[in-house]
Image: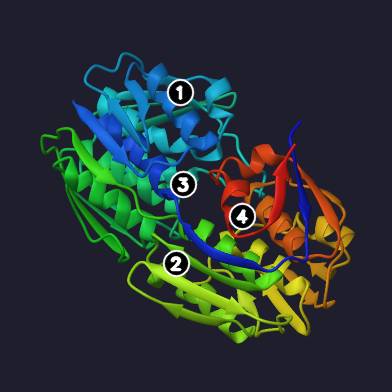
């Protein structure tokens, strides 16, 4: 079992290039299945979730291989329409393959997805979108079987689910006629998926707004596309420096996608300036409490940045209230932060953080991806040494986290 050993209390300084976005590349890899040709995905990070997606594509009969920082997928002749339980369990977002497999093969068989346990994340919106397009859905003993010749339709999502929006887009590309997705998620990763689909020849427009229109049935072809930088990884490095002190320049990320995070860090006492594809942060002294932080769908405060920000503020001063509106079980990192001396009170979806000026090192365990990143942030700002276990969660979304932090001057090693 791997662990991080972190000696905290060292100010960080330097520049770090942000790798491709996990939440973009996973639906883009699923979309590769739609094109009868070779797709080159540039800026594709080396993450365990990416490897799980490539394994699914290979199982389906596609050629999928890495070439440096790019991945090449050739879906000229897929042979299967099923994803077995062992592959589905490796990541929660594996359900994103549903729309692509059904659209390309005319049928799809999947098991219940795995991944982080963040509370109920039902896929009913995904299935409602499939049914709206004319697909049939049979649920038997934890498995799904979908089939049908899809037709364009009006899809109205009851809430702006990112995964359901992506699945609807992928299925609609293969449907005959026009599909309109209303109350669509507006996340930048949705815009990135649209950009990739357009590179394949698909007629998709409206991503980034609440209404997406897909003209289905157009011939597709292979193509090349560069994935956007990961805004949540960037947020993690910004909060790490905010916790430990020092300065950092993160590059390769659109500052506008992180404006809600940088606004909170400014309020906490950090100096933040932004350029076209970079963000610079400097901080001296402990962070101070800020106004309530409420997670919300984009362009609101991202739920994935909640835990790292909480870790940074826990070692500051003053009081901050967090309201988690996206997932029911997104405070699992709190008990581990308390082991490091944090003063945090949780009641339902509300967490009240009382800054203690400085956390102390302790052995802690990651129980999910962003909670694990939060423990690293806390350890970097704490006095003494910390050991963080459960790194398989962190490896799902961070490529060489320890190397990037070492380049900033952190004392962190993987053992």
What scheme was used to colour the molecule? Answer: rainbow
Foreground mark, 4 or 3, reads 4
Q: CA gap, disc 4 to disc 3?
A: 19 Å
Crowd band around label 3 with a 10 angstrom C-alpha radius: few (<14), some (14–19), many (20+) = many
Mark before the other along the chain sequence, 2 or 4: 2
User: Which residue corresponds to mark 2?
Assistant: 298
Q: Say if mark 3 contacts mark 2, CB within 8 Å.
A: no
Q: CA gap, disc 1 to disc 4?
A: 29 Å
Residue found at the very far left of the displayed protein: 219
Residue 339: x, y in percent?
89, 58
**Is label 1 in a helix, a strand or a loop?**
helix
Foreground mark, 1 or 4, reads 4
Task: State which quarter of the image contains the C terminus.
Answer: top right
- Is 381 on the left-hand or right-hand side of 53? right
Q: Residue at x 63, y 44 (%)?
A: 394
Q: In this view, does 83 lie above or below 180?
A: above
**Is label 4 in a helix, a strand or a loop?**
helix
Q: Quadrant of residue 304?
A: bottom right
Depth check: give the residue in front, 10 or 374: 10
Q: Residue at x 74, y 40 (%)?
A: 390
Q: Can residue 99 be seen in this view?
A: yes
**Is label 3 in a helix, a strand or a loop?**
helix
User: Which residue corresponds to mark 1?
Assistant: 55
Mark before the other along the chain sequence, 4 or 3: 3
- Is 196 on the left-hand or right-hand side of 68? left
Q: CA gap, disc 2 to disc 4?
A: 28 Å
- Is 254 on the left-hand or right-hand side of 55? left
Q: CA gap, disc 2 to disc 1?
A: 30 Å
Mark before the other along the chain sequence, 2 or 1: 1
Q: In this view, does 245 lie above or below 205?
A: below
């Amino acid at each position: 079992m791997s662990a991080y050993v972190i000696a905290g209390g060292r100010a960080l300084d330097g520049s770090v290039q942000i790798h491709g976005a996990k939440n973009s590349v996973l639906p883009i890899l699923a979309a590769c299945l739609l094109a009868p040709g070779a797709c080159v995905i540039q800026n594709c990070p080396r993450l365990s979730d990416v490897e799980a997606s490539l394994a699914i594509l290979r199982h389906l009969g596609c050629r999928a291989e890495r070439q440096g920082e790019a991945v090449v997928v050739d879906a000229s002749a897929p042979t299967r329409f099923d994803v077995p339980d062992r592959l589905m369990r490796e990541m929660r977002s594996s359900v994103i393959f549903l729309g692509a497999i059904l659209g390309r093969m005319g049928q799809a068989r999947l098991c219940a997805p795995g991944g982080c346990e963040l509370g109920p994340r039902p896929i009913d919106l995904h299935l409602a979108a499939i049914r709206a397009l004319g697909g049939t859905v049979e649920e038997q003993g934890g498995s799904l079987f979908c089939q049908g010749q899809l037709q364009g339709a009006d899809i109205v999502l009851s809430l702006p689910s990112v995964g359901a929006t992506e699945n609807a887009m992928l299925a609609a590309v293969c449907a005959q006629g026009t599909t309109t997705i209303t109350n669509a998620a507006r996340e930048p990763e949705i815009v990135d998926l649209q950009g990739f689909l357009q590179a394949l020849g698909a007629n998709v427009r409206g991503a980034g707004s609440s209404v997406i229109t897909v003209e289905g049935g157009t011939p597709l072809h292979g193509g090349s596309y560069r994935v956007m930088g990961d805004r949540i990884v960037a947020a993690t490095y910004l909060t790490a420096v905010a916790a430990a002190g020092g300065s950092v320049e993160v590059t390769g990320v659109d500052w506008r996608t992180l404006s809600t995070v940088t606004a909170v860090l400014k309020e906490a006492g950090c100096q933040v300036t932004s350029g076209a594809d970079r963000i610079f942060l400097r901080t001296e002294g402990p962070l101070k409490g800020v106004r309530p932080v409420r997670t919300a769908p984009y362009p609101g405060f991202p739920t994935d940045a909640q835990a790292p920000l909480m870790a940074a503020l826990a070692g500051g001063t003053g009081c901050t209230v967090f309201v988690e509106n996206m997932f029911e079980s997104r405070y699992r990192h709190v008990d581990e932060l308390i082991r490091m001396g944090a003063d945090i009170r949780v009641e339902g979806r509300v967490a009240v953080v009382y800054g203690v000026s400085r956390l102390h090192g302790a052995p802690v365990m990651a129980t999910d991806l962003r909670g694990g990143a939060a423990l690293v942030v806390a350890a970097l700002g704490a006095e003494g040494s910390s050991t963080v276990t459960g790194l398989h969660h962190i490896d799902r979304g961070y490529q060489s986290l320890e190397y990037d932090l070492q380049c900033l001057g952190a004392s962190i090693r993987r053992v």
